[in-house]
Amino acid sequence: MMKVRLFGIAVALAFAATFSVLARQAGVAAAPDVHPISGRRFAQVMSAAGADWLSRPERVEEEEPDRALDVLKIPKGAVVADVGAGSGYMTVKMSKRVGPTGKVYANDIQPEMLRLLGLRLKADKITNVTLVQGEVDNPRLPAATLDLELLVDVYHEFSAPQTMLKQLRDALKPAGRLVLLEYRKEDPSIPIRPEHKMSMAEARLEVEAEGYTLSQVNESLPRQHILVFTKRGL
């Protein structure tokens, strides 16, 4: 129990340090902000100091990531993006799903996360992944290119969610999908801080306001919503 508490403290400190750095880079105050439509408080960003947590063995049981990808039915040859890829836990899984004729854009705002991901790709000899250094208000993904954009426990950390959603919308093909996996705020028993959870109502309110339609909801995962949005004509 003491090890768990100490690890939790270390991750919290990593969150705080990264948020402060990113806020200074963006020229904004380090104080947390809230979404102008829902009033939801933005969460702090996990830094590369917490990268080991992203690949923890318990994640298989706690989140069942392969089941999530099964639900999404990503076809061979698809062009997809892992937005907020971190050290590449989901990137590697997606690269296998799309196969050698497909492509994965692995996006993150932290150079150190991308460095760790690059090392992982090299070690595993994965060649269908392109690393993308994003910004807090721009994912820097190619326009009208993507069949699917996957955001796993990432959207709630966006400090400029409205701008990011517009940019992500532009990067989707007409029939492309934006997918959020978010810890259920509706379930207080899930051991994640409240600001790192989202309710389905919050996600729908915020995302649909930026030109999307919630087209699929899947609650088969132990702790997370699977929320699939499609582009709506404006």
Image: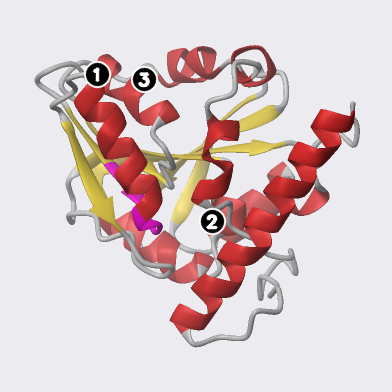
Where disc 2 sits, the SS reads helix
Residue 125 coordinates in the image, percent (x, y): 17, 20
Q: Amino acid at mark 2?
A: Glu
CA gap between label 2 and label 1 equals 38 Å
Which residue sits at x=39%, y=59%?
109
- Give the labeled residue for mark 1: 124
Whether residue 206 appears in magenta in the rendering, the answer is no
**Quadrant containing the N terminus in the rendered view:** top right
Residue 75 coordinates in the image, percent (x, y): 25, 17
Task: Mark 2 or mark 1: name the one nearer the start of the chain.
Answer: 1
- Label 3 or label 1, whichever lies nearer to me, is 1
Task: Mark 2 or mark 3: name the one nearer the start of the chain.
Answer: 3
Q: Amino acid at mark 1?
A: Asp
- Give the labeled residue for mark 3: 93
* Crowd rating for badge 1 (residues with CA inside 10 Å; few <14, some 14–19, many 20+): few
* Crowd rating for badge 2 (residues with CA inside 10 Å; few <14, some 14–19, many 20+): some
Which residue sits at x=85%, y=37%?
5
CA gap between label 3 and label 1 equals 12 Å
Q: On residue 208, which mark appears? A: 2
Where disc 3 sits, the SS reads helix
Residue 100 coordinates in the image, percent (x, y): 11, 18
CA gap between label 2 and label 3 equals 28 Å
Task: Mark 3 or mark 1: name the one nearer the start of the chain.
Answer: 3
Which residue sits at x=56%, y=63%?
18
Q: Tell which of 126 and 103 is nearer to you.
A: 126
Where disc 1 sits, the SS reads loop
Magenta-colored span: 106-111
